[in-house]
Amino acid sequence: MSLDDLDRRLLTIIQSSFPIAAEPYKQLAEELNTTEEDILSRVQRFKDTGLIRRIGGIFDSRNLGYKSTLCAMRAPEDKLEKAIAVVNEYPGVTHNYLREHEFNVWFTLITPSEEYMEKVLDEIRERTGCEVHNLPAVRFFKIKVDFRLDKERQGAAEAAQ
Amino acid sequence: MLTEVDKKLIRLLQDDLPVTSRPFAALAEQVGLTEEEVIARTKEYQEKGYMRRFGVALRHREVGFTANGMGCWDVPEERAEEVGKTMATFREASHCYQRPRFEGWPYSHFTMIHGETREECEAIAKRISEATGITNYRLLFSTEELKKTSMRYFMEE
């Protein structure tokens, strides 16, 4: 789908600060100098075309008492397909990527406790027969994803160097 | 402390907010609070750090960021803090963490690097390398997205 200038400005705003207010779309319309109907139809179009997955809260697993980690799995060619299916079954596995390395399957796992995390990983090791390393973060430097889609993106990227 | 009502509201907030004029009123009805209470509690979750942000989740691959490389960096422990902070200043690096090393894996710092092409990601990694002086690194490109979902909390109860 093609995005016009207003689409891009709207997307940039609602990524990080969707208004938590009684009439959020009206507030966005005022900010962007258009009508509430226009904003509602643009957002609906973003959803219909699959550009946005959902509008909602991104919660902090640590502050909610959950444990999260990144896992590196070495899955040889003959075990790969089965291993991916097994890993993806778990609801706590939120991201999983195939990467170009001997450790080729990298997934994130979020669980209510460390004990449960170990249990899930042991189960994955046993069911896949693959080596899995649990790499929980020891220091956090940046946890936010924020992409600028408007025209200033390039400028901001350069300023950050 | 989060009450049962809070957990119920959090479950709703991790769903998809309706695209209607008064979306929080719709949530209020389901959770048995007023619209004002829902808005106040949602803001409070953000202030207290339970909620990192409220907004849209994009499908990055559909908005021009087609390459993603996991930057893996071998950073000496005595420089871990300082180098991590420098890496975090790069706008194109969306995450930055220090993680344990393991046998056969010398890298301690992880940054997710997003660009429109592999070459762009490589150029960003090179700039990070120059800014930090860390020269032992590699960029692991993803060849396939196997799963991508949002975590749903308090669903196990």
Image: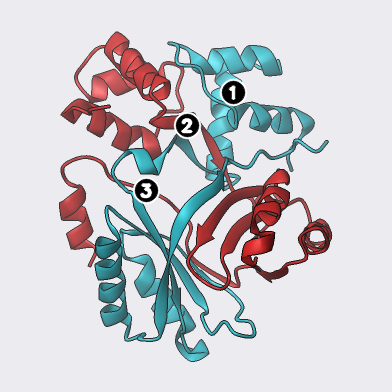
Chain colours: A red, B cyan
Q: Around disc 1, counting alpha carbons within 10 Å, would you say few (fewer than 14), some (14 to 19), or many (20 or more)?
A: many
User: Badge 3 sits on which subunit?
Assistant: A
Q: Which amino acid does the dot numbered 3 rest on?
A: Asp
Residue lying at 69% horizontally and 19% vertically, measured from the top left: B31
Structural distance between the alpha carbons of marks 1 and 2: 23 Å
Residue A120 lies, in percent from the top left, at: 79, 56
Q: Label 1, on which residue?
A: B38
Asked whether A34 or B115 is in front, the reply is: B115
Q: Label 2, on which residue?
A: A53
Q: Around disc 3, counting alpha carbons within 10 Å, would you say few (fewer than 14), some (14 to 19), or many (20 or more)?
A: some
Structural distance between the alpha carbons of marks 2 and 3: 15 Å
Q: Label 3, on which residue?
A: A146
2 vs 3, front mark: 2
SS at mark 3 in the image = loop
1 vs 2, front mark: 2
User: Badge 1 sits on which subunit?
Assistant: B
SS at mark 2 in the image = strand
Q: Closer to the N terminus: mark 2 or mark 3?
A: 2
Q: Around disc 2, counting alpha carbons within 10 Å, would you say few (fewer than 14), some (14 to 19), or many (20 or more)?
A: some
